Amino acid sequence: MFVDDYSFDAYKAAGFSRFDQLDKEAVKDIKMTAPALSFGEFMNYFSTVGKVSPVPKDMKFGEFPEGVLWVGGTFVVQGDEVLYQWSDTVPGNHPVVEDVVNIAKEAAQKKKSNGLLDKVSWF
């Protein structure tokens, strides 16, 4: 989900927060990990982020857009039901991808066994 809004109401409604406003004691044991990117991939990432990040018109040099301070999360949704939700605490804090995929696959298999899906394909 991509949210392009300076009110951040969607983030708040989903229970997300800004990592700079967290209780330092509560997050002291969480490790922030950088992705394993080559120098070129790293530069491409920052170039892309700069192009797609909303920057307020009145922002001054050296300031950060508020959007970079908000952390998101991961959802598995089926119809109107949220099967899984993970709220990132700090940048780089995310669920194990295989766990999320397995939850989604299990839900799809249940739906398929109930005759609700004709075909399921993954990646």
Image (cartoon, helix red, strand yellow):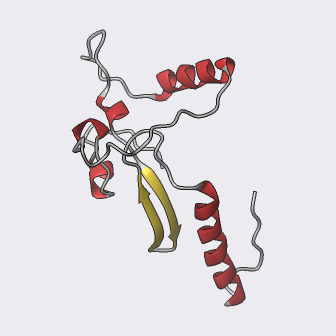
Toward the front, the furthest residue is 29
Above/below status of 32 relative to 43: below
Of residues 74 and 56, which is closer to you in this image? 74
Measured as percent of width and height from the top left, residue 97 is found at 61, 55
Of residues 4 and 76, which is closer to you in this image? 76
Q: Quadrant of the C terminus?
A: bottom right
Decide if residue 71 is on the left or right side of residue 13.
Answer: right
* Residue at the spot 35% in from the left edge and 23% down from the top edge: 55
* Residue at the spot 22% in from the left edge and 39% down from the top edge: 21
Above/below status of 35 relative to 119: above
State which quadrant residue 90 falls in: top left
Decide if residue 84 is on the left or right side of residue 101.
Answer: left
State which quadrant residue 42 falls in: top right
Toward the bottom, the furthest residue is 114
Above/below status of 65 relative to 101: above
Decide if residue 42 is on the left or right side of residue 60.
Answer: right
